[in-house]
Image (cartoon, rainbow, N blue to C red):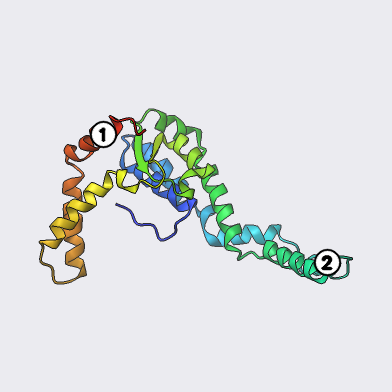
């Protein structure tokens, strides 16, 4: 199980890397992926430092803004363009930072050794919904590198996800359990989860019911 605090393509790729690490035999391959996702070049500090080096200096920024102030555009258009300039040059702009993170993460994973090792590992199949981040280009590329196959559910059909059967079983057990605090509840949940996911019947039933029909 893994919980992400950031719901974006970058974090989803990190999760996919963790799945690959937990389900591969090659120890050196695990090490390479760990190094790729924990590289210092992905830190906010390093990225902001890089973005700062690419930004306009103070005088050039002032001149660029002045050019917009004294051109023939309407006041509203000038204001909008100046706002755009400021956002672009803001090194704390979260969108810029995440875009750079995604680019660096993919470059870190584009290691020929990582690709070669994973090509020999057993393919991972992950069933998931059609959330936008799941279809991001970086996700597609990362899956190619990590030898992961994404199986998308039909739109607006979350109940087709076999994990729903797992949640249903866990809920029934939690309702019958006695616990005194949050930590005890978490332990009950974890115990049931890891017991259930090892039961072949859960995914076998799903395969027979859904993959054996014409809905795919």
**Left or right side of 127 for 83:** right
Residue drawn 53% across the image and 42% down it:
137
- Counting from the top left corner in percent of width and height, residue 157 is at 36, 46
- Which residue, given by chain and number where applicable, does mark 2 sit on? 68
Q: Is residue 28 above or below residue 10?
A: above
Q: Is residue 47 visible?
A: no
Please identify the residue farthest to the front as the structure is shown. 214
Please identify the residue farthest to the top as the structure is shown. 120
- Counting from the top left corner in percent of width and height, residue 22 is at 31, 43
Decide: few, some or many residues near mark 2? Use Cα within 10 Å; few <14, some 14-19, many ≥20: some
User: 160 or 15, which is in the foreground?
Assistant: 160
Distance from label 1 to label 2 (Cα)? 61 Å
User: 98 or 160, which is in the foreground?
Assistant: 160
What is the quadrant of the C terminus in the image? Answer: top left
Residue drawn 38% across the image and 28% down it:
120
Decide: few, some or many residues near mark 1? Use Cα within 10 Å; few <14, some 14-19, many ≥20: few
Identify the mark at residue 53; answer none if there is no mark.
none
Q: Quadrant of residue 175?
A: bottom left
- Counting from the top left corner in percent of width and height, residue 121 is at 35, 31
Q: Is residue 28 visible?
A: yes
SS state under label 2 = helix
- Counting from the top left corner in percent of width and height, residue 72 is at 89, 65
- Which residue, given by chain and number where applicable, does mark 1 sit on? 207
User: 46 or 195, which is in the foreground?
Assistant: 195
Counting residues from the N terminus, which is met first, the one under dot 1 or under dot 2? 2
**Left or right side of 61 for 92:** left
């Amino acid at each position: 199980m893994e919980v992400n605090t950031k719901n974006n393509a970058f974090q989803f790729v990190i999760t996919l890397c963790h799945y690959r690490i937990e389900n591969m035999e090659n120890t050196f391959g695990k090490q390479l992926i760990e190094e790729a996702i924990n590289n210092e070049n992905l830190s906010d500090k390093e990225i902001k430092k890089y973005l700062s080096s690419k930004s306009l200096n103070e005088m050039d920024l002032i001149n660029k803004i002045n050019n917009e102030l004294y051109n023939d555009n309407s006041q509203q258009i000038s204001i909008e363009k100046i706002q755009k300039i400021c956002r672009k040059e803001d090194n704390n702009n979260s969108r810029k930072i995440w875009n750079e993170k995604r680019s660096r993460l993919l470059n870190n994973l584009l290691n020929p050794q990582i690709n070669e090792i994973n090509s020999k590992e057993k393919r991972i199949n992950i069933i998931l919904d059609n959330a936008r981040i799941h279809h991001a280009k970086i996700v597609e590329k990362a899956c190619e590198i990590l030898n992961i196959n994404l199986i998308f559910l039909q739109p607006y059909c979350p109940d087709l996800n076999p994990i729903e059967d797992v949640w249903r079983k866990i809920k029934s057990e939690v309702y019958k359990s006695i616990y005194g605090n949050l930590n005890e509840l978490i332990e009950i949940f974890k115990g049931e989860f890891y017991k259930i996911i090892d039961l072949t019947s859960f995914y076998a039933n799903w395969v027979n019911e859904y993959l054996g029909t014409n809905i795919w």
